[in-house]
Image: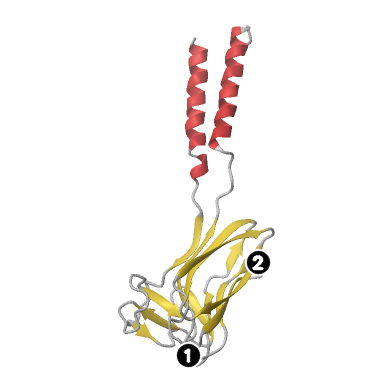
C-alpha cells in the first residue's frame, strides 16, 4: 500500500507541474509607449528618445496635453513625418540578437488626422526577417497591428519605422512591443494522460508481482 501511495503522490506532483507548463510567459525585448521621454507636450524634430535613434529626416513627439490632442488617453505618441518637410526613420537603438524561434512585433498606427495629404505611407521592418508597408488615410483611427515572425537561423536586426514623403504631417506611432515567444510545450491534458497511464501501469505491475520502483 505504501508503494501505491508513493505512486499516487508522484503522479499528483507531476500533474501540478504540467498544469503550469503552458503558462510560461513571452520574453519582452522592447516595450515602448514613449511615456518616459523627457520633453514638452509637443516637441518638433525630437531626437532624444530613450530607445530609438532618428536615422533620417525628423519626427515630432506629441502628447494628449498638447494643442493637437487627437488621441485622448494615449499619452505621448510620435508623428513620423516631422516638422521639417523631411519624413523620418525611427530605428531602435538595440540591434537585436535573434536566435531561432517565434517572435511577435506589435504597434499602434493611426492616420495623420489632418486632411492634407489624404494618405501617408510607412514601412516597418525588423532586420532582414520582416518588412511590411502600410498606407493609411489621414482619418484612420489608432489601431493595433501585430505580426508573428519566425526566425529560422541566428541573425541580428533593428526595428525600424521609415516614413515616405516629406510634407510635414505623417502617420502616428505608439505602443511598440517586441517579444520572443516561449518554446511550445505539450498540452497539460496530454501530459496528464501520460502521467495517469504511467501510474496505472505501475499499479498493475505491483498487483501482478512486479517489483515496485
The picture places residue 166, in percent across and down from the top left corner, at 53, 90
Q: Which mark is residue 190?
A: none
In the picture as drawn, the residue positioned furthest to the bottom comes out as: 85
Query: What is the x, y in percent for residue 174?
Result: 44, 72
Residue matched to label 1: 168
**Secondary structure under badge 1?**
loop
Q: Quadrant of residue 147?
A: bottom right
Q: Residue at x 44, y 71 (%)?
A: 142
**In the drawing, does residue 164 fall left or right of residue 66?**
right
Alpha-carbon span between mark 2 and mark 1: 30 Å
Dot 2: element: loop
Would you name the residue on which mark 2 appears?
Answer: 129
Q: In which quadrant is the C terminus drawn?
A: top right
Render colour scheme: secondary structure
Residue 105 percent across, percent down from the top left: 54, 64
Q: Earlier in the sequence, mark 2 or mark 1?
A: 2
Amino acid at each position: 500500500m505504501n508503494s501505491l501511495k508513493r505512486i499516487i503522490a508522484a503522479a499528483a506532483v507531476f500533474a501540478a507541474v504540467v498544469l503550469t507548463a503552458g503558462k510560461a510567459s513571452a520574453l519582452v525585448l522592447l516595450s515602448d509607449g514613449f511615456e518616459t521621454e523627457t520633453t514638452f507636450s509637443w516637441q518638433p524634430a525630437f531626437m532624444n528618445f530613450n530607445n530609438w535613434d532618428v536615422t533620417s529626416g525628423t519626427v515630432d513627439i506629441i502628447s494628449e496635453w498638447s494643442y493637437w490632442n487627437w488621441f485622448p488617453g494615449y499619452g505621448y505618441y510620435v508623428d513620423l513625418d516631422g516638422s521639417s518637410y523631411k519624413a523620418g526613420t525611427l530605428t531602435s537603438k538595440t540591434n537585436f540578437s535573434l536566435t531561432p524561434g517565434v517572435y511577435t512585433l506589435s504597434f499602434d498606427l493611426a492616420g495623420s488626422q489632418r486632411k492634407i495629404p489624404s494618405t501617408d505611407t510607412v514601412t516597418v521592418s525588423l532586420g532582414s526577417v520582416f518588412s511590411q508597408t502600410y498606407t493609411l488615410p489621414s482619418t484612420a483611427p489608432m489601431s493595433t497591428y501585430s505580426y508573428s515572425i519566425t526566425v529560422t537561423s541566428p541573425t541580428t536586426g533593428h526595428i525600424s519605422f521609415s516614413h515616405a514623403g516629406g510634407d510635414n504631417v505623417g502617420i502616428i506611432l505608439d505602443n511598440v512591443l517586441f517579444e520572443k515567444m516561449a518554446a511550445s510545450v505539450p498540452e497539460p491534458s496530454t501530459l496528464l494522460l501520460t502521467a495517469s497511464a504511467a501510474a496505472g501501469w505501475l499499479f498493475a505491475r505491483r498487483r501482478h508481482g512486479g517489483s515496485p520502483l
